């Protein structure tokens, strides 16, 4: 998959009180304070980003998709029928979550700016945008649509999805097809996925000392 524009980070701003953030540090001037905050933030941001990657890899949806066309529907999104890999229509051997993993592993940048004479500093974090992740996760059979967005907001043709672990000859994944004249009765449960992970990550940036 092409990664044109990778990565388009969106700014996320947090205002901090320097004295509260650096309770035990004494700094003589504003320039030194700015650098001290940068030195404090950088390793903590790395730790939080590592946690984001860990949470992404441990997510039930990620695990199910990485398991391929014969996985069980451990996420429960399809009510236990088939699996997401086959339902979305990936080809056997695809690694659909790989591009997201690369986005989350790319080092996140930030900048620190003093706010007047208030003693407060604004930290701007540049983190992945959900819009770009949508753009880099296309549904194989629906140009312009994102499978990540589909998982979170719903997908069409749910009832016509047929799955067989023994396989279908005309199937991209090998185990799933969309049958126009048959109904499996499968249900689809919209589930927060990447938006939830990013929301939780932003929450850790607001409570940066935790």
Image (cartoon, grey):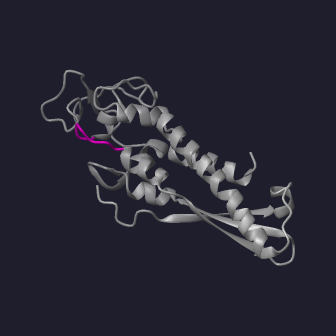
Image location of residue 198, percent across then percent down: 57, 50
Q: Which secondary structure is most common in the magenta stretch?
A: loop
Instruction: Quadrant for residue 181, please give it.
Output: top left
The structure residue drawn at horizontal position 34% and vertical position 33%, both measured from the top left corner, is: 159
Residue 51 versus residue 163 in the image, above or below: below
Relative to 164, 60 lies left or right: right
The structure residue drawn at horizontal position 81% and vertical position 57%, both measured from the top left corner, is: 22
Range drawn in magenta: 90-96
Instruction: Quadrant for residue 134, please give it.
Output: bottom left
In which quadrant will I find the C terminus? top right
The structure residue drawn at horizontal position 12% and vertical position 31%, both measured from the top left corner, is: 169
Specify whether residue 70 is in view.
Answer: yes
Number of marks present in the image shown: 0
Of 79 and 62, the residue lying toward us: 62
Of 68 and 33, the residue lying toward us: 33
Work out which residue is located at the far left of the displayed protein and give it: 169
Residue 192 versus residue 30 in the image, above or below: above
Q: Is residue 158 magenta?
A: no
Work out which residue is located at the far bottom of the displayed protein and give it: 116
Residue 126 versus residue 116 in the image, above or below: above
Of 96 and 111, the residue lying toward us: 111
Specify whether residue 188 is in view.
Answer: no
Image location of residue 151, percent across then percent down: 44, 42
């Amino acid at each position: 998959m092409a990664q044109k524009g990778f990565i388009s980070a969106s700014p996320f701003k947090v205002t901090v009180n320097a004295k509260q953030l650096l309770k035990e540090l004494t700094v003589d001037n504003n320039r030194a304070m700015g650098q001290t905050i940068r030195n404090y933030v950088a390793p903590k941001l790395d730790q939080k980003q590592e946690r984001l990657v860990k949470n992404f890899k441990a997510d039930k949806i990620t695990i199910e998709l990485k398991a391929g066309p014969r996985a069980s529907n451990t996420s429960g999104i399809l009510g236990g029928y088939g699996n997401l890999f086959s339902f979305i229509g990936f080809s056997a051997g695809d690694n659909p979550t790989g591009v997201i993993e690369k986005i989350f592993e790319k080092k996140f940048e930030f900048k620190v700016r003093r706010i007047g004479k208030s003693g407060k500093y604004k930290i701007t974090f540049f983190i992945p945008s959900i819009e770009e992740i949508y753009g880099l996760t296309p549904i194989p059979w629906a140009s312009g649509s994102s499978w990540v967005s589909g998982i979170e907001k719903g997908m069409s043709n749910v009832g016509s999805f047929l799955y067989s672990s023994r396989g279908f000859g005309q199937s991209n994944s090998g185990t799933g097809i969309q049958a126009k004249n048959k109904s499996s009765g499968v249900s689809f449960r919209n589930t927060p996925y990447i938006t939830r992970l990013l929301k939780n990550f932003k929450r850790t940036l607001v409570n940066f000392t935790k």
